[in-house]
Image (spheres, grey):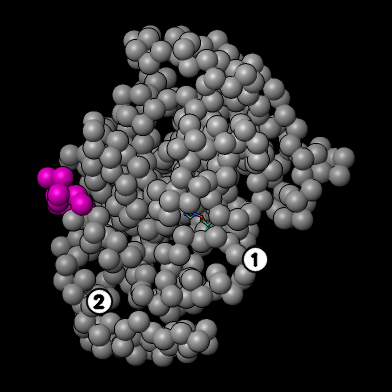
């Protein structure tokens, strides 16, 4: 039963797309289990760059079955345009499967996302505006429309009859109008139903069958541990569980199906949107990370806030997800800094705190306690040498940095990525998939 989960250790944008694509070379299935088009996974293959929001990263690999699990919320227009993008590059969606139980993001979810965000004023979450929160809220309130519903006109009409008036009242309470009349929305949804019909199925059955047959199954997380609705920096989080526990409910597999969990961890920290960020830098180093790291959102283009690596966050992620190893990304971005710092604990009112507090009031008072290390230069970090000799060719101070993180996190670093390309990766693990 070889399975592997790829989960973000921080606030998303850790480079999960690249790592998932890299590991997908040996996978039979790549399964997404939560989130929606708020995610942005960038994958570089040769000269082509793919910005995926909904499609699993496996879609770029030939022969990999890509599954959109029931835990996602699907923006139909976005999915259509990603499939078109795929066709333009000469690829097909033949290997795509979509859960009949995944919820659909409807036009009014986007409207409500914007209206609710404006109503929060200065306390806004800084959502991606993709309707994610309102759609998940409807799912939990039993007012959602699911992919399977799009295939049955009579049932879909019944569902719209129940939910549309409720939503219309809500939209009107913000002084706004529904974008589409009920009958027109029905027609649009049926058209999408026809378009996606070949892909919609009970994905839980096919994933469990694949696991039973010894196929290699990869679970691809979106966002990151710190955006998790329960264990992130609530309320400055997304509306789904992004941690490994969500694999079970979002893909329809038992807990025993989750074997190895790789925590994708950026060599420094970034976050988009509002909320606590203890190691955030407002100085020249912060700007260096933003510019050299190209830290601008794939989904919204917004500049990302940047800061030093926070091991309180990483240890929180290792514990919550049962991470068995770390894939460290964007190490190259730290080159040419005279010194690098890693936060090991927080000072809160004179107390040393080494686990991530649930209270925003405590986080507001948290001061980072840093371990400072000497930096390394990009000149000492030659890609061609590294490709040939691997870990040993990394600059001494970079290896010290990595050793420190390994010891502090309590799990090994398996993969080191120092560029966007598939080949700009050092894989330290001899045998990845357990048999
Ligand atoms: P929502 O998911 O659009 O509701 O946004 C909630 C918060 O999660 C905002 O701060 C977003 O910027 C953040 N967020 C959502 N998806 C991602 C992602 O894929 N990467 C980074 N931040 C994200």
* Category of crowding for the residue at label 1, using alpha-carbon neighbours closer than 10 angstroms: few (below 14), some (14–19), many (at least 20): few
Dot 1 corresponds to which residue? 122
- Residue 91 in view here: no
* Relative image position of residue 289 (x, y in whole percent): 54, 34
Looking at the rendered structure, which numbered label has been put on residue 189? Answer: 2
In the rendered view, would you say 321 is above or below 389?
A: below
- Residue 15 in view here: yes
Say which of 50 and 189 sits in front.
50
Q: Please, what secondary structure does the residue beneath circle 1 have?
A: helix
Assess whether residue 92 is covered by the magenta stretch: yes
Q: Is mark 1 within 8 Å of ligand 1?
A: no
Which residue appears at 40% of the width and 77% of the height? Answer: 108
In the rendered view, would you say 401 is above or below 313?
A: above
Mark 2 or 1, closer to the camera: 1
Say which of 2 and 70 sits in front.
70
Looking at the rendered structure, which numbered label has been put on residue 64? Answer: none
Say which of 386 and 280 sits in front.
280
Q: Quadrant of the C terminus?
A: top left
* Relative image position of residue 95 (x, y in whole percent): 18, 49
The residue segment tinted magenta is 85-96
Which residue appears at 65% of the width and 36% of the height? Answer: 283
In the rendered view, would you say 375 is above or below 57?
A: above
Which residue appears at 34% of the width and 64% of the height? Answer: 74
Assess whether residue 395 is covered by the magenta stretch: no
Residue 379 lies left or right of residue 76; in this view the side is right
In the rendered view, would you say 366 is above or below 260?
A: below
Q: Quadrant of the N terminus?
A: top left
């Amino acid at each position: 039963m070889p399975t592997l989960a790829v989960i973000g250790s921080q606030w998303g944008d850790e480079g999960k797309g690249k790592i998932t694509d890299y590991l997908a070379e040996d996978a039979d299935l790549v399964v997404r289990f939560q989130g929606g088009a708020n995610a942005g996974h960038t994958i570089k293959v040769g000269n082509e760059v793919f910005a995926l929001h909904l499609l699993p990263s496996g879609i770029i690999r030939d022969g990999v079955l890509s599954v959109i699990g029931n835990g996602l919320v699907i923006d139909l227009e976005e999915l259509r345009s990603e499939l078109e993008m795929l066709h333009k590059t000469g690829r097909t969606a033949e290997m795509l499967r979509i859960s009949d139980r995944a919820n659909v993001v409807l036009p009014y979810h986007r409207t409500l996302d914007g209206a609710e965000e404006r109503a929060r004023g200065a306390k806004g979450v800084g959502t991606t505006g993709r309707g994610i929160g309102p759609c998940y809220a409807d799912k939990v309130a039993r007012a959602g429309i699911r992919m399977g519903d799009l295939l049955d006109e009579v049932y879909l009409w019944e569902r719209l009859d129940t939910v549309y008036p409720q939503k219309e009242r809500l939209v009107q309470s913000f002084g706004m109008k529904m974008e589409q009349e009920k009958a027109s929305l029905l027609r649009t949804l049926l058209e999408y139903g026809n378009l996606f019909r070949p892909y919609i199925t009970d994905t839980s059955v096919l994933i469990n069958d694949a696991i039973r047959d010894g196929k290699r199954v990869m679970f691809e997380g979106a966002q990151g541990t710190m955006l998790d609705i329960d264990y992130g920096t609530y309320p400055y989080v997304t509306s789904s569980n992004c941690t490994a526990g969500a694999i079970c409910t979002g893909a329809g597999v038992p807990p025993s199906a989750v074997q190895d969990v790789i925590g994708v961890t950026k060599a420094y920290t970034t976050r988009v949107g509002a909320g606590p960020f203890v190691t955030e830098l407002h100085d020249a180093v912060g700007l260096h990370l933003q510019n050299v790291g190209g830290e601008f959102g794939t989904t919204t283009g917004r500049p990302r806030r940047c800061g030093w690596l926070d091991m309180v966050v990483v240890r929180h992620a290792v514990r919550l997800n049962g991470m068995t190893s770390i894939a460290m990304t964007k190490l190259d971005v730290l080159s040419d800094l005279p010194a690098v710092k890693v936060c090991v604990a927080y000072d809160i009112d004179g107390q040393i705190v080494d686990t991530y507090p649930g209270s925003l009031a405590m986080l507001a008072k948290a001061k980072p306690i840093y371990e400072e290390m000497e930096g390394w230069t990009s000149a000492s970090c030659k890609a061609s040498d590294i490709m040939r000799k691997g870990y040993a060719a990394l600059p001494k101070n970079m290896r010290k940095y990595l050793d420190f993180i390994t010891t502090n996190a309590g799990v090994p670093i398996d993969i080191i990525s120092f560029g966007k390309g598939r080949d700009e990766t050092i894989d330290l693990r001899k045998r990845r998939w357990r048999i």
